[in-house]
Amino acid sequence: MKFLVTGGAGFIGSHIVDKLLNEGHVVTVIDDESADNKFWWNDNATNHRASINCYDYLSYLMDGVDIVFHLAAESRVQKCAKNPRMAVKTNVMGLCNVLQSARDKDVKRVIYSSTSSAYGLTNPIPNEEDMKVDCINPYASTKVAGELLCRNFSDLYGLETVIFRYFNVYGDRSPIKGQYAPLVGRFLDQYKKGKPLTIVPDGSQRRDYVHVSDVVEANMIAGFKKDIGSGEIYNVGSGISHSVTEIADMISNKQEWIEPRDGEAKETLADISKIKSFFQWKPTIKLQDWVKANK
């Protein structure tokens, strides 16, 4: 089969590319390297350093593609807040380009990487897919707009779509730059450099952390399963939450407080009963085991 992976040189996307190639598939990657982190290009893929905002180029890459994994996005909350027009251009118009070009070229399915940020601050724990969205920043709003577009293309045009709401993804290749980088990777990087772990007060904030290999497996199932419930949303998390201080204590007792941040949820926790039931998927990596093995 032939696959197109947008954002395929990034953290999660590169792992999906590696998995597909290891299974003998043909893979095309498009990534414009606009994120603030290291990029991972697999030389066995057909690689294109380009933007999904270039419709004609994207349409050209869709020729003969069976399945699209769409991970390209402006994914940093603070960058989206500072430049909402950029967030809309990439996360909404860019996705629309992917969906329209896929439809035009008779691609069977698009698997869309969305976010648990859709649940915001007001929904009870654990988060279920049918809860009302509570978008508190342009990042969340643009990603949820993408979910609606996926459903539109499924309902109106028959393009199969799968919508995954990722919780806090960690693992090899995780971004580590800046205080807004994913926490687990940042803590491990600080520890290995002999620096104190920087914690936002008061450290009791809890998050659902899911390993990147489990995220990849969810994508693989969605890519190959015959019946995928087109247009449906699925949480991808561990179903377990850990506090910031719990994770810090797993790594080092050398810790320091940094400036507090507004507008962040006190806790995130995925209800994963839907994805477990429909896809027979379940997380396999425990956070504490992975941290211990990678210190």
Image (cartoon, rainbow, N blue to C red):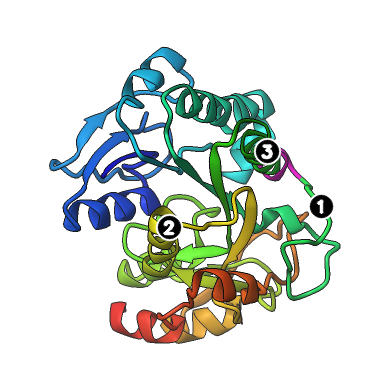
Q: Is residue 268 magenta?
A: no
Three-letter code for the amino acid on which mark 3 is drawn: Asp
The residues tagged by marks 1 and 3 sit, at their Cα atoms, a distance apart of 24 Å
For mark 2, give the secondary structure. helix
Q: Is residue 205 left or right of residue 12?
A: right
Other residues around mark 3 within 10 Å, as few (<14) / some (14–19) / many (≥20)? some
Other residues around mark 1 within 10 Å, as few (<14) / some (14–19) / many (≥20)? some
For mark 1, give the secondary structure. loop
* Quarter where residue 138 is shown: top right
Residue bearing mark 2: 219
For mark 3, give the secondary structure. helix
The residue that appears at 65% across and 28% down in the rendered structure is: 88
Which secondary structure is most common in the magenta stretch? Answer: helix
* Closer to viewer: mark 1 or mark 2: 2
Residue bearing mark 3: 155
Three-letter code for the amino acid on which mark 2 is drawn: Asn
